[in-house]
Image: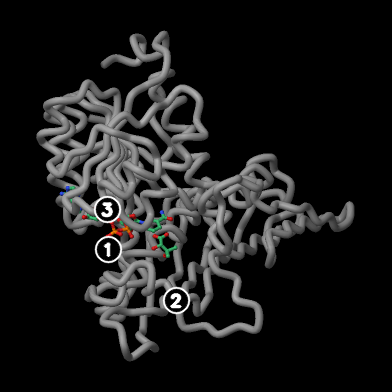
Amino acid sequence: MSASTLRDRGALNGALIGCGFFARNHLHAWRDIDGANIVALCDADESRLHAAGREFGIERLYTDAATMLREERLDFVDIATTVASHRALVEMAAAAGVATICQKPFARTLDDAYAMVAACDEANVPLMVHENFRWQSAIQAVGAALRAGEIGKPFWGRVSFRSAFDVFSGQPYLAEGERFIVEDLGIHILDIARFLFGDATRVTASTSRVNPTIKGEDVATIMLRHESGVNSIVDCSYATRLPHDLFPQTLIEVDGSAGTLRLMADYQLQIHTTMGTEVRDATPPALSWASAPWEAIQGSVLNIQSHWIECLRSGREPATSGRDNLRTLALVEATYLSAREGRSVECATSSIGRLRDE
Ligand code: NAD
Ligand code: 89V
């Protein structure tokens, strides 16, 4: 359905595929958004499907996505399954002509991601990756301060996520993959670095595994050279035991030509210039359904899904469109390659740019 048609419509009807651990946040956020109704749910696992249907009062339930796409009249579909099913589901939604949101990681490989973007382009349907970390209120506040030139021209940055929070109890699959922290969490932190400093062209990375009970890497240190001239460090760890664990906070340091910015623990945003030092409180807004320690992420889910509805109505491309996310995925791939081969890797952003211009 075209944006001009959607602009004048009442509430947009959506369906959610995947009623697992994280989908509850999507469903709570959809309930808070005027102008969007989730009218149907799909999960291959009947017990999860029915539990979500009961909790959120949604009666049209499907165990098969193709059947749901055939039987429902949808303005959009929100895919909250794990990565293995993303390509098939996005291509199925595109073939049905339905605008699509897909959770991160968007795809297992860049080839899959290109194919998914191409499928939605060919079907002329909007595609957004649910890359929500940059939509956290504190991260948006950092972006706004940098764009307003509050510390002059940034030349160095650090985006850091260090914790020992047990993510495996809620998401057991994270302990089982050959890849862990860069693909699951680093992808958000790399996306924040792109959001703040622009696209990166060179990646130098090192990874390691500290926790012997998981398969993949749980520590990564990544150096990025950005087109803007900024050099940044993206570092993440799930093996860092701190007296006050900060999960899921991202700490940020930026040095600029006229001052410094620090997003410190507990969402305290410090701006220092020759005019003085100011500390602003960037604590996420309290949502009735939020649960500690996830508040910042839950707020970002509401923000990104609200952005999606605005984009559908205006015809604008979402900030984290499928096309945009190719560049974040390219950094994930470059990180693994750099770490494996012990060398710097140039990012193939020119070919991604060609796709953007086509
Ligand atoms: P999960 O395994 O708990 O839930 C996934 C659900 O999808 C399961 O119930 C499964 O039965 C269903 N499913 C899988 N394939 C299907 C198919 N083809 N048709 C219908 N149902 C299908 O996973 P999760 O922890 O909720 O994670 C889901 C996604 O969300 C992952 O990609 C993960 O990386 C992402 N995630 C994002 C954040 C964030 O902050 N952005 C946080 C946690 C998880
Ligand atoms: O955001 C995520 O993708 C989650 C977590 C924050 C736990 O890493 O998997």
Q: Secondary structure at mark 1?
A: helix
3 or 2: mark nearer the eye: 3
In the rendered image, the quadrant that contains the C terminus is: top left
Extreme residue in the front direction: 54
Q: CA distance from mark 3 to mark 2?
A: 22 Å
- Does the Cβ of the disc 1 residue fall within 8 Å of ligand 1? no
Marks 1 and 3: in contact by CB < 8 Å? no
Label 2: which residue? 166
Q: Which residue is found at the position 61% from the left and 83% from the top?
A: 242
Q: Earlier in the sequence, mark 2 or mark 1?
A: 2
Q: Nearer the viewer, residue 345 or 46?
A: 46
Question: Is residue 251 at all visible to an observer of this figure?
Answer: yes
Instruction: Describe residue 323's horizontal placement relative to residue 167 as left or right.
Output: left
Label 3: which residue? 48
Label 1: which residue? 333
Q: Secondary structure at mark 3?
A: helix
Q: Which residue is found at the position 46% from the left and 25% from the top?
A: 310
- Does the Cβ of the disc 3 residue fall within 8 Å of ligand 1? yes
2 or 1: mark nearer the eye: 2
